[in-house]
Amino acid sequence: MHAGLTLAHILPALAFVMLTPLVFVRRFAHAVWPERLLFPLGAIVGGTAYAMSVYSVGGWVERSAVLIFNTLFLVSLAQAYRYSRQAKHALKLRWLVLAIGILLGIATTRPVMGFFFATSRLTHLEPQQFFGIAFWVGFSINTVAVGLWLRSERAKSLLESWAQYS
């Protein structure tokens, strides 16, 4: 059961991450298929993340990070979808960038976990004790970084100019 759920989460997440650049490459700007696949894949990734939180190694600390950041991911993805349906391309891109940034927080979590594993002989912390902290740190770094970037003038002009190609 757990292995199947993990595969049901990881495979759509891999497809989501592989499709993401196609949404932002100008050569594919008028191709709608990458974006049409991105939204359902994101919904599957989010749904399975909730289900996987039942088996969290880090207990309630990890589970709380997953529930909060996964909800932020799904809300951001839903907003991007809504603006996509309304042909408000700049707003769609802003929300999509936020969703992608939050989703990639799991990649930032991995080196944080590596740090905890590497220092476990000194700290005597077990994975059950640091997995939740690693999730909070990884997802927080990405969410804050992407949020700050989206507020920058560079991001605003870049997304506005890219939205013209959509």
Image: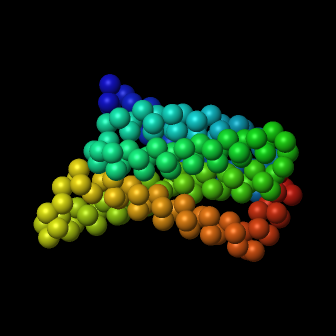
**Residue 58: where, in percent of width, then height?**
29, 48
Tell me what residue is drawn at x 52 percent, y 62 percent: 142
Front residue of 109/18: it is 109
Quadrant of the image containing the N terminus: top left
Q: Residue at x 42, y 50 (%)?
A: 65
**Which residue is most to the bottom?**
153
**Left or right: 87, with 19 as reference point:** right
Q: Is residue 155 visible?
A: yes
Q: Quadrant of residue 121?
A: bottom left
Position of 33 compared to 102: left or right? right
Is residue 150 rendered to the left or right of residue 50?
Answer: right
Question: Foreground residue, 124 or 15?
Answer: 124
* Observer-nearest of 48 and 124: 124
**117 versus 131 height, above or below:** below
- On the question of residue 16 being in view, the answer is no
Image coords of residue 36 (percent x, y): 70, 37
Q: Quadrant of residue 116?
A: bottom left
Total labels: the figure holds 0
Residue drawn at (56%, 68%), measured in percent from left and top? 145
State left or right for residue 135 relative to residue 161: left
**Residue 52 against residue 102 in the figure, above or below:** above
Q: How is the image coloured?
A: rainbow
Q: Which x, y percent locates residue 2? A: 32, 30
Residue 3 lies, in percent from the top left, at: 32, 31
